[in-house]
Image (cartoon, rainbow, N blue to C red):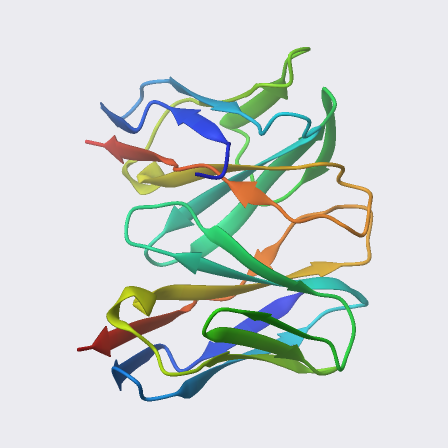
Amino acid sequence: EDQVTQSPEALRLQEGESSSLNCSYTVSGLRGLFWYRQDPGKGPEFLFTLYSAGEEKEKERLKATLTKKESFLHITAPKPEDSATYLCAVQARSNDYKLSFGAGTTVTVRA
Amino acid sequence: DSGVTQTPKHLITATGQRVTLRCSPRSGDLSVYWYQQSLDQGLQFLIQYYNGEERAKGNILERFSAQQFPDLHSELNLSSLELGDSALYFCASSVDGRASYNEQFFGPGTRLTVL
């Protein structure tokens, strides 16, 4: 069974204080690793897809990287509007296309 | 705005009742996925439909069922509701559930409260 573990559970940052979120995964053949942002009471918002080890993607202050066992989401010089729960999910190379999600990391950025 | 719409936004009902949640995928998307999010379980995959046919099943209870119609909208039916069914239910859609390029875009969700 696919397993996704995210750490830390919560992260409190000062505005401008860069940090990284970790997503460790176990999957029998990775089709893709996905990062989403979720605000309270809202649907997850797609951020990135990573397909192979060594791949990196960037969007504004966010950068996602992928190795064979884990992915990192780096937040550079965060702003209060970056406060959200960040979810990591994996999709296996199988006949179904479900996403298996981690529990998320809740990031709070103080001004 | 992801382009995925869900109705209703909120639903409050009693134990033992039956409800229907509705989802319209993004224009052009053939796959629809249903997920349940509760505080203790996180986001859990329930079921996927592709172009009207069931493609994959996850941890979906027998009391729950879904279907996708010819216009590609989908409905999730929850029956004999229990207190533990209270959760956020999300619909997501993607272009094609078979391709490598398979980002899923989520709707705003339906919050179900069972009293």
Task: Name the residue located 66 percent from the left edge and 35 percent from the top edge.
Answer: B48
Task: Name the residue located 47 percent from the left edge and 51 percent from the top edge.
Answer: A45
Q: Nearer the viewer, residue A41 or A54?
A: A54
Q: Name above or below for residue A102 compared with residue B3.
A: below
Task: Name the residue located 40 percent from the left edge and 82 percent from the top edge.
Answer: A8
Q: Nearer the viewer, residue B76 or A44?
A: A44
Q: Residue furthest top?
A: B70
Classify residue A67 as left or right of residue B8. right
Count of numbered badges drawn on the protein = 0
Q: Nearer the viewer, residue B87 or B91?
A: B91
Q: Tell me residue A26's x, y (percent).
A: 68, 74
Question: Quarter of the image holding residue A16?
Answer: bottom left
Task: Name the residue located 39 percent from the left edge and 36 percent from the top edge.
Answer: B109
Name the quarter where the C terminus of chain B is drawn.
Answer: top left
Q: Nearer the viewer, residue B50 or B57?
A: B50
Q: Name above or below for residue B58 compared with residue B40.
A: above
Q: Name above or below for residue A7 compared with residue A36.
A: below
* Residue A59 appearing in the image: yes
Q: Residue furthest front?
A: A60
* Residue A1 appearing in the image: no
Question: Quarter of the image holding residue B70?
Answer: top right
Q: Tell me residue A111's x, y (percent).
A: 17, 78
Classify residue A36 as left or right of residue A41. right
Classify residue A83 as left or right of residue B75. left
Q: Tell me residue A37's x, y (percent).
A: 43, 59
Q: Tell me residue B83's x, y (percent).
A: 27, 37
Question: Quarter of the image holding residue B49?
Answer: top right
Name the quarter where the N terminus of chain B is drawn.
Answer: top left
